[in-house]
Amino acid sequence: MNALTATNRNFRYAARILGLDSKLERSLLIPFREIKVECSIPKDDGSLATFVGFRIQHDNARGPMKGGIRYHPEVDPDEVNALAQLMTWKTAVAAIPYGGAKGGIGCNPRELSMSELERLTRVFTQKIHDLIGIHRDVPAPDMGTNSQTMAWILDEYSKFHGHSPAVVTGKPIDLGGSLGREAATGLGVFFATEALLAEHGKSISNMKFAIQGFGNVGSWAAKFFHEHGGKVVAVSDITGGVLNKENAADVKAKFIIEAANHPTDPEADEILSKKGVVILPDIYANSGGVTVSYFEWVQNIQGFMWEEEKVNHELKRYMMSAFKDIKTMCQTHNCNLRMGAFTLGVNRVAQATLLRGWE
Ligand SMILES: NC(=O)C1=CN([C@@H]2O[C@H](COP(=O)(O)OP(=O)(O)OC[C@H]3O[C@@H](n4cnc5c(N)ncnc54)[C@H](OP(=O)(O)O)[C@@H]3O)[C@@H](O)[C@H]2O)C=CC1
Ligand SMILES: O=C(O)CCC(=O)C(=O)O
């Protein structure tokens, strides 16, 4: 099932639980704006290379649209659309004043030099600069992009609009980035896992962790689990799993923490749920990244930098509060954690939309 079909299915299920009006349901599902741009750059050898870039702005009822930009060979409009929609529900679950968006360029960043990546990022920014902005749509890093990518976007955007550090988050500290943003998604995953395990009378200490994906999110999460007594028994990256052969067959997860976006197909979701596996959904589990992005944006607007301790303290507070709100929805609607998170997010966006009206 493709990512968009799966995400729409989860949304519709939540809308049904909430008893949303079918017209409102349709309005919430259709993206606010879909942008597709051609990005041609000269390669280092002088030849021409053309890529397709997307920015899908899903919803802005609760505030400026927010979400990462990914560079990956499999980026396609349906996937970006699904990820943009997930951002709308995620920012609502996290109770931060944003809507949702996501972007991407279909490319393999491993096959491009630094100067080619810079040219590609600048061309993409030239094509979308009028449609993003501090109070409109604020990009951030995602798979295949990082703080350097954000620095190039900031620089290119500022040529058109004047110095604008708050136009992106996840940027280098020297350009107004927030202390703690680099580690934030992994730290949020850690806090989310701690909250879930506590519910089940367990703790991180001595628990075994298998981590799929070992980039920004996976590596920071592994570090925090390890530092708190967790045993990281397996990690995997694009080249496959690193483990020894002896223990591979023994990995039997009782809890799945969705640190990535949309990592579980709805059919797999059902099978795992029937087996009694508890799944902590992406729109909550990895919301630490966008939450600290929000803190970064606030600091840029305030022109005042927070200590890292304050960033991490506030992150923990937001993660704990969202977990409590999700559990309340689970109890109210007698549903699992994914539907608890979806109903929480969708309901907050629906209320904001109704309050704003359509005139
Ligand atoms: N960065 C952030 O703040 C946030 C990220 N996320 C989500 O978390 C996930 C990871 O993002 P992030 O850590 O930033 O990305 P990175 O690019 O830093 O890391 C991605 C990791 O996934 C591996 N990988 C990529 N493609 C494949 C594949 N086809 N099969 C197996 N492994 C693969 C990469 O391997 P290799 O190292 O070999 O390239 C790398 O280990 C994404 O779903 C993203 O949307 C969610 C919230 C915030
Ligand atoms: O930090 C952000 O603004 C967005 C992070 C993101 O893309 C995500 O949560 O999936």
Image (spheres, rainbow, N blue to C red):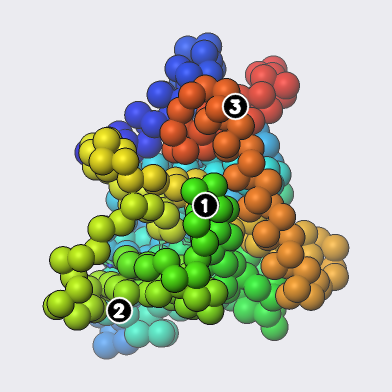
Residue pointed to by mark 2? 110
Residue underneath mark 3: 347
Q: Is residue 24 above or below residue 63?
A: above
Residue type for callout 3: Asn
Secondary structure under tag 2 reads: helix
Quarter of the figure with residue 150 = bottom right
Mark 2 or mark 1, which is nearer the start of the sequence? Answer: 2
Give the left or right position of residue 155, taking residue 54 as reference: right
**Number of numbered discs present?**
3
The residue type indicated by label 2 comes to Arg
Percent position of residue 279, x then y? 39, 46
Disc 1 marks a residue whose amino acid type is Gly
**Mark 2 Cα shell of 10 Å, populated few (<14), some (14-19), many (≥20):** few
Left or right position of 186 against 45: right
Q: Is mark 2 within 8 Å of ligand 1?
A: yes
Which of 241 and 175 lies nearest the eye of the viewer? 241
Residue in view at x 41 percent, y 85 percent = 114
Q: Earlier in the sequence, mark 2 or mark 3?
A: 2
Q: Which residue is mark 1?
A: 201
**Within the image, what quadrant is residue 117 found in?**
bottom left
Residue 26, image x, y percentages: 46, 20
